[in-house]
Image (tube, grey):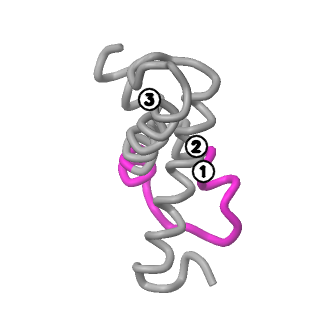
């Protein structure tokens, strides 16, 4: 997968995580994309531990794992950050 597609996938995953997470998260496109990319790494490794899929493969479990990883990062950022993201 090319770098551009990876960043677009990260942006979509970041938007999904922000839409699912309750509360207001004030971040721009770049921060949302970085959230999705980092969540994809975390979710991909978690899915690779549980299933026989590779980290770099695009599959349904990887997409769900990516969103879950981004949600975990968003929750951590809300707790550690300024305190206005999650109460």
- Rendered location of residue 36, percent (x, y): 45, 44
Label whose residue precedes the other's in the sequence (2 or 1): 1
Label whose residue precedes the other's in the sequence (1 or 3): 3
Q: How far apart are labels 3 and 2 at the CA level?
A: 14 Å
> Which residue is situated farthest in the left direction here?
3
Q: Residues within 10 Å of mark 2 (few under 14, many from 20)?
A: many
Q: Residue at x 41, y 37 (%)?
A: 45
**Which sits in the foreground, 1 or 56?**
56
Q: Is residue 32 magenta?
A: yes
Question: Circle 2 — which element?
Answer: helix
Q: Which residue is mark 1?
A: 17
Question: Circle 3 — which element?
Answer: helix
Q: Which residue is mark 2?
A: 67
| Vertical position of residue 59 compared to residue 41: above or below | above
**Labels 3, 2: front one:** 2
Question: Circle 1 — which element?
Answer: helix
**Residue 6: which quarter of the image?**
top left
């Amino acid at each position: 997968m090319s770098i551009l597609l990876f960043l677009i996938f990260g942006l979509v995953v970041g938007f999904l995580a922000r839409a699912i997470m309750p509360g207001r998260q004030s971040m721009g496109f770049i921060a949302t994309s970085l959230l999705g990319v980092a969540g994809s790494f975390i979710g991909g490794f978690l899915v690779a531990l549980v299933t026989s899929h590779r980290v770099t493969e695009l599959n349904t479990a990887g997409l769900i794992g990516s969103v879950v990883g981004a949600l975990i990062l968003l929750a951590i950022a809300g707790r550690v950050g300024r305190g206005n993201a999650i109460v």
